[in-house]
Structure formats: structure tokens, C-alpha cells
Amino acid sequence: MRRKNSNLTAMGISVFLLISSFYNFTRLSGTECIRAIHVVSLLICGMAIGIFLTNLVALLRNKP
């Protein structure tokens, strides 16, 4: 039972990171030059999606 709770916690943290980084990325104006914050924001989005999907699959596999 402990494993399921840790998966949900990791999913919650990754969803929070995904929402906050996506919100910050959409607020940026001007696409004429890519700044370092664009790259960091997209990397965080990608990592959060990966963590979320990994934990979702693990949660579904461990379902009784």
C-alpha cells in the first residue's frame, strides 16, 4: 500500500511542475530569440510529463 501512495505523491508533484512551467512558458512573449529560460521551461515540462507517465503506468500495473 505504501508504494501506491508514493506513486500518487510523485504524480502530484509532477503535475504541479507541469502546470507551473507550462503557465510560465505560455506567458513568455516574443519567439524571435530563444533564451535560456525557454529551454529550461521546456526541459521541466518534458521531465514532468515523463515522471507523470512513469508513475501512472506503475500505478496501473500495481492495481489489484
Image: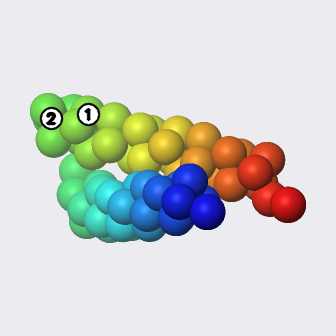
Q: Where is mark 2, residue-wise?
A: 35
Q: Where is residue 49 in the image (x, y as percent from the top left)?
A: 51, 47
Quadrant in the rendering for residue 60? bottom right
**Circles 1 and 2 in contact, beta carbons < 8 Å:** yes
Asked whether 15 or 56 is in front, the reply is 56
Task: Mark yes or no: residue 7 visible.
Answer: yes
Question: In the image, what residue occupies the spot 68% across and 45% down?
Answer: 58
Image-based side of 47 in relation to 39, left or right: right
Q: Where is residue 19 in the image (x, y as percent from the top left)?
A: 39, 66
Task: Mark yes or no: residue 11 visible.
Answer: no
User: Mark 2 belongs to which amino acid?
Assistant: Arg
Please tell me whether mark 1 sits on a helix, a strand or a loop.
Answer: helix
Image-based side of 56 in relation to 50, left or right: right
Q: Position of residue 34 (x, y in %)?
A: 22, 33
Asked whether 46 or 55 is in front, the reply is 55
Q: How far apart are marks 1 and 2 (CA)?
A: 7 Å
Q: Where is residue 44 in the image (x, y as percent from the top left)?
A: 32, 43
In the picture, the disc for residue 59 is none
Asked whether 51 or 42 is in front, the reply is 51
Image-based side of 18 in relation to 41, left or right: right
Question: In the image, what residue occupies the spot 75% across and 51% down?
Answer: 62
Q: Where is mark 1, residue-wise?
A: 39
